[in-house]
């Protein structure tokens, strides 16, 4: 990964955290907004899970089956739906406008850069795929020249998509608790249950992170190779 892309990725993560804090602070959710927004969030994560089961390591192989047969960027479609669902839950029209504008600005540059890289890597097969499959909004018929492969559950683990899956209950419960405990100043049985759910899934995320760091440090302590790499 080049330095410009790494810096842009870090900027995108920082902006996402800032956006999440602003969203929670200005959120004014209601039972109806949860009823409409939560299914949109789950649909977005469903698309992400579907896509994660078909994509190998970025740049290793061109993914053209599964959701990639209908949209060139199904992971970003999933991100859009998840973000949209969260904004719908927040019930704030200004946040909706901010989300739509920010998403378009940030992801347009990302996608254009990735398309150039993929064209360099895969050449004519990618150019043909580029012409046949839309960038974002899915088409109704699959890509006719797709390489048919099976969905692989092990890729879900490889891409750590379960982290996003664990984060969803934390975020939704957090929005609910903000509205009830901070805005309405209520703390009944429903709020206690929501708090317990948020803490359980947050603890799972923390444990996952700690175990990953432990594995990294263990790998880093492996013995050195006998022969130095070629110059």
Image (cartoon, grey):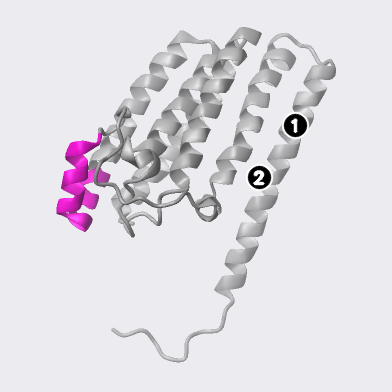
**Magenta stretch, main secondary structure class:** helix
Which quarter of the figure has residue 166? top right
- Determine whether, in the image, residue 91 is placed left or right of residue 30: left
Where is mark 2, residue-wise? 205
Is residue 124 found inside the magenta-colored segment of the image? yes
The location of residue 189, given as percent across then percent down, is: 85, 18
Is residue 157 found inside the magenta-colored segment of the image? no
Q: Quadrant of the N terminus?
A: bottom left
The location of residue 211, given as percent across then percent down, is: 66, 58
The residue at 62%/29% (across/down) is 171
The location of residue 120, given as percent across then percent down, is: 18, 55
- Decide if residue 26 is in sight here: no
Q: What range of the chain is rendered magenta?
A: 113-133
Q: CA distance from mark 1 to mark 2?
A: 13 Å
Mark 1 or 2 closer to N-term? Answer: 1
Q: Residues within 10 Å of mark 1 (few under 14, many from 20)?
A: some
- Judge by depth and name the residue closer to the eye, 30 or 62: 62
The residue at 53%/26% (across/down) is 41
- Judge by depth and name the residue closer to the eye, 15 or 31: 31
In the rendered image, the vertical position of residue 209 relative to residue 38, given as above or below: below
In the rendered image, the vertical position of residue 218 relative to residue 68, given as above or below: below
Where is mark 1, residue-wise? 197
The location of residue 37, given as percent across then percent down, is: 55, 17
């Amino acid at each position: 990964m080049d330095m410009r892309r790494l810096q842009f990725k870090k900027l995108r993560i920082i902006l996402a955290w800032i956006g999440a804090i602003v969203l929670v602070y200005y959120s004014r959710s209601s039972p109806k907004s949860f009823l409409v927004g939560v299914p949109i969030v789950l649909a977005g994560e469903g698309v992400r899970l579907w896509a994660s089961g078909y994509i190998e390591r970025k740049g290793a192989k061109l993914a053209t089956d599964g959701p990639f047969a209908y949209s060139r960027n199904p992971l970003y479609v999933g991100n859009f739906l998840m973000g949209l669902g969260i904004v719908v839950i927040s019930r704030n029209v200004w946040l909706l406008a901010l989300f739509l504008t920010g998403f378009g600005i940030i992801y347009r540059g990302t996608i254009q850069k990735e398309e150039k890289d993929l064209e360099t890597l895969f050449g004519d097969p990618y150019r043909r795929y580029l012409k046949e499959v839309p960038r974002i909004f899915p088409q109704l018929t699959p890509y006719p020249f797709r390489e048919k492969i099976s969905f692989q559950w092990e890729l879900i683990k490889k891409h750590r998509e379960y982290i996003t899956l664990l984060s969803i209950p934390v975020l939704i419960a957090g929005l609910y608790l903000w509205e009830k405990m901070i805005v309405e100043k209520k703390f009944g049985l429903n709020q206690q249950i929501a708090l317990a759910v948020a803490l359980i899934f947050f603890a799972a995320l923390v444990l996952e992170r700690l175990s990953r760091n432990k594995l990294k440090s263990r790998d880093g302590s492996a013995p050195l190779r006998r022969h130095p790499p070629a110059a």
